[in-house]
Image: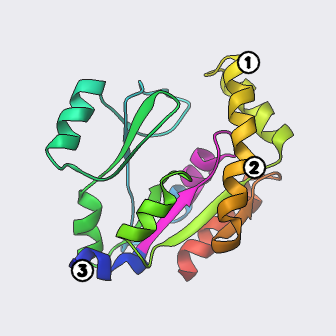
């Protein structure tokens, strides 16, 4: 087992359906915990253009993503919603150096992530179907049909992992759910 895998207890894996508010909660936690010297938030590499109101990610073309994937530049990769997502191998160095690493992961990739990092701390962000629908409509990135497809997946995937992860309900205020996330990160 690699040294990074031994330090996987310092990896916090945030996941949840599109529209549950992961990006907002991660932004909240990043702002609240900025002074924590042993804590880093990993960027995702995504084959989607940067949206100034959305996730703080590194945009790559599909070709560049594939090239980096083949070159071994990613610790984790998955596909979703016609895009490719990756977490860079830099997280392994950070874990080896004793840092706590926060990643914005995927529910579908969770099984593979926990195989690679057996002691990771998973957190599932959830929200009601109505809340998710409202948020997806507001961000205006998907068509009505795409929103309905995403809503169908919300509960089916969450149901399979809900009993093995810490869950944060994000139906209320951002501050309430954000404080829960910050407390969980501090208490890891």
Residue stretch rendered in magenta on the structure: 11-29
In the rendered structure, does residue 17 fall within the stretch colored magenta?
yes
| Residue under label 1 | 144
Label 2 neighbour load within 10 Å: few <14, some 14-19, many 20+: some
| Residue under label 3 | 1
Residue 33 versus residue 136: which sits nearer the camera?
Answer: 136
State the residue at coordinates (42%, 63%): 113
Quarter of the picture containing the N terminus is bottom left
| Residue under label 2 | 155
Label 1 neighbour load within 10 Å: few <14, some 14-19, many 20+: few
126 to the left or right of 161: right
- Of pointers 1 and 2, the one earlier in the residue sequence: 1
State the residue at coordinates (75%, 54%): 170
Circle 2: element type: helix
Circle 3: element type: loop
Residue 51 versus residue 147: which sits nearer the camera?
Answer: 147
Confirm or deny contact between disc 1 and disc 3 (CB under 8 A): no
132 to the left or right of 76: right
Image position, residue 55 (x, y; %): 50, 39
Residue 72 versus residue 33: which sits nearer the camera?
Answer: 72
State the residue at coordinates (26%, 66%): 92
The answer for how far apart the CA atoms under marks 3 and 2 are is 34 Å
Q: Disc 1 or disc 2, which is closer to the eye?
A: 2
Rendered position, 128 above or below 169: above
Decide if residue 186 is in sight here.
yes
């Amino acid at each position: 087992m690699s040294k990074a895998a031994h330090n996987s207890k310092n990896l916090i894996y945030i996941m949840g359906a599109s529209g549950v508010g992961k990006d907002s909660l991660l932004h909240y936690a990043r702002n609240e915990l900025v002074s924590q010297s042993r804590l880093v938030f990993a960027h995702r590499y995504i084959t989607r253009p940067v949206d100034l109101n959305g996730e703080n990610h590194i945009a790559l073309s599909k070709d560049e993503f594939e090239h980096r994937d083949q070159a071994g530049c990613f610790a984790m990769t998955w596909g979703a919603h016609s895009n490719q997502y990756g977490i860079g191998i830099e997280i392994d160095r950070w874990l080896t150096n004793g840092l706590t690493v926060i990643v914005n992961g995927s529910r579908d990739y969770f099984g593979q992530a926990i195989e690679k990092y057996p002691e990771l701390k998973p957190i599932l962000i959830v929200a009601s179907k109505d809340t998710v629908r409202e948020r997806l409509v507001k961000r205006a990135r998907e068509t009505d049909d795409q929103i309905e497809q995403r809503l169908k997946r919300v509960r089916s995937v969450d149901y399979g992992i809900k009993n093995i992860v810490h869950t944060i309900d994000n139906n209320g205020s951002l501050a309430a759910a954000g404080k829960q996330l910050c407390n969980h990160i501090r208490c890891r």
